[in-house]
Image: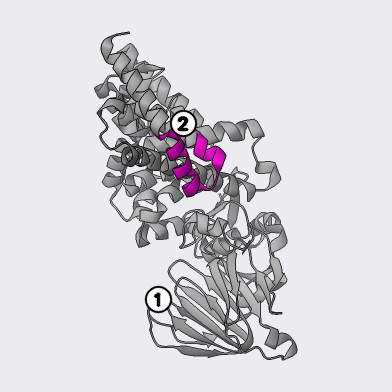
Amino acid sequence: MPAAASRAPAPSSLPMAGGLPLDESVADQAAEWLTVLMSGEASDADRQRWQRWRASHPDHERAWQHIEAVAGRLKELEPRAGYAALAARAAPRSHGRRKAAHLLLWGGLAAGGGLLASRSPEWRRQMADFRTGAGERRRIALEDGSVVTLNTASAIDVRIDGRRRVVRLVAGEVFVATRHAQDGSEDARPFVVETAEGRVRALGTRFVVRQWDGRSTVAVLESAVEITPAAGGGRRILRAGERASFDRTAAGPASAASEPDSAWIRGQIVAEDMPLADFLAELGRYRPGLVRCDPAVAGLRLSGVFPVDDTGRILASLPQVLPVRVRRRTRYWITVEAAP
Amino acid sequence: MGTTELTLQQDIEALYADHHGWLQRWLQRRLGDSFLAADLAQDTFVSVMRANAAGGIRVPRPFLATVARRLVAHHRRRQLLETSYLDMLAALPEDCAPSPEARLQALETLQQVDRALDGLPPRVREAFLLAHLAGLSYAEIARRLGVSASSVKQYLMRANRQCLFAILA
C-alpha cells in the first residue's frame, strides 16, 4: 500500500509497453490507430495500413501488443460496476449535461434515478438509511407509525425528531402512507418528502414520489399534498387522483393520476399505449442490467399489465406481440431491435 | 555511502524521531482509526524519504501534515472507488457475479485505470469510459456528451494515449 500511495501520478510518467519504456511518438501512433479502429468506420484500406504500421517496426508491434493486453484487462471489469465506480469519481465536479448523459446510459436502471443516475453522487445512495437494489421492493414501517414502500433501485434517508418527520428521497421512487392515512390518528409534526427539486408535504395521505433526473413527480392516491419547489417557486396543492411534475423553480399543472403511477406498489408495470422505448426504460429499472432500445423500434406501442418480478419473461415475450427481436450481448446487456 | 546520502539518512532519522509520534496522533484525530493512522504516518515518511526532501524542510510539522493530507485523500479515493464498484456488483444477480479472484483482479485494474485517467478533463474521461466499458459508438457518445463526433475522436485519442500506456499489461 505505501508504494501505491506515493507513486508518481501516471500522466507525467513515460509511456510503457511490455514493461519497457516506449517512444512517445510510437505511443501517439498506437493510440491513434486504436481510436480509428474502435470507431467502427475503419475501411479495409485503413486496416491494411494499420497492419503495415504494426509490421514496420518491433516497437510498433510491442505497442500494439500492450494495447491488446490492456484491453483484455479492461474486460475483466464488470462493465456496469466499473463504469459506475469510475464515472462517480468525477461526479462531484460534473454538472447537468453530464448527469443527463449518465441518466440515459444504462437505460432503465438510470431512469428511476437508480444506481447511476441519482442526482447526488453514488456514495450518497450508498450511505442512505434504506435502499433497494434493482428488482427489489421494500416496505418499511417508520417509528411514527407511517409506512413507506421503496420501489426498485431506490434510496431514502429518514429523519424523525420532535418537530418534523422527513423522508429524503435520494434516488428512485417511494410510496408513502402516513399514520393518519392508516388509522386517522393525528400527529402535529409535518410529514415531508424531500427530493432534489423540492418538498412534498403530506396533508394526511397516501402518495407516490419519484425522483427523475432534474425533476420529481408526485401522484396522490388519497387526501392531498403540498408541493414547494426548492428555489421558492409557488406552492401547489395536489389532490387525490392528481399528479404533477416539478423542478427546482416551479410545479407543472396537475393532470389525472393514472394506473401506471402506482401499479408498481403491486409489483406491476401498466402500459397504456406506451412507446416501446419508454416501456423498456421502465422495465430496465427492475433489472440489474442495461436494456437498450434500437431507435428503429422505439416508437412501437404496447399495452398490458406486466409483473415486474420476472423481467426476463417479459422481454422474452416481446417478439410475440411486436415485430422485434431481443438480442443478448451479455446476460446484463440486452438490445431490443427490429425483427429481421 | 557518500556524505550527501549520509546527511539525508540523518535528516530523515531526526525528522522521524521528532515528529512521528505527533503525526500519528494528528492522523488518528482526523481518521479515528489508529491502525490506519499508523499506516499513513509510515507512508508519509516513506514519501518524504523518496523525494529526498527531509533535509530542506524548515517547518516540519506543516510540511508533514501537507504530505499526510494528500495520502489521506488518496486513501479515501481508493476506498470510495472500491466501495462503489463492489456495491454495484452486489446489485447484480448471483450468476453474473464474478469469482473472488476475478474480483480482486478487477479492483486492481480499477485502481490503475482511475490513476491513469487522473487529470483528464471530465468529458475526456467520460468518453473513455463510455467507449471502453459501455461499448457505445462514437456517434452515441457524441450525442450523450453534447459534442461533435470529431471532438469524441480527439477525446478518445487523448484518453487512449494517456491511459493505456500508464496501465501495466
- Measuring 68% from the left and 60% from the top, which residue is drawn there? A136
Figure colour scheme: one colour
Q: Amino acid at mark 2?
A: Gln
Q: Which residue range is magenta in the image? A: B19-38
> Do we see residue A201 in this rendering?
yes
User: From the viewer's perspective, is A290 left or right of B10?
Assistant: right
The answer for which chain carries disc 1 is A
Tell me which corner region of the image, top left, top right, bottom left or bottom right, holds residue B72.
top left
- Measuring 63% from the left and 44% from the top, which residue is drawn there? A331
**Image location (x, y in percent) of residue A126:** 56, 56
What residue would you read off at disc 2? B42
> Do we see residue A305 in this rendering?
no
Check if mark 1 and mark 2 are on a common chain.
no
What residue would you read off at disc 1? A248
Q: Nearer the viewer, residue A17 or A168?
A: A168
**Image location (x, y in percent) of residue B73:** 42, 44
Tell me which corner region of the image, top left, top right, bottom left or bottom right, holds residue A164.
bottom right
User: From the viewer's perspective, is A6 left or right of A177?
Assistant: left
Tell me which corner region of the image, top left, top right, bottom left or bottom right, holds residue B10.
top left
Residue extending farthest to the front is B18
**Image location (x, y in percent) of residue B37:** 50, 39
Depicted A61 relative to depicted A217: above or below:
above
Which callout, 1 or 2, points to the residue nearer the camera?
Answer: 2
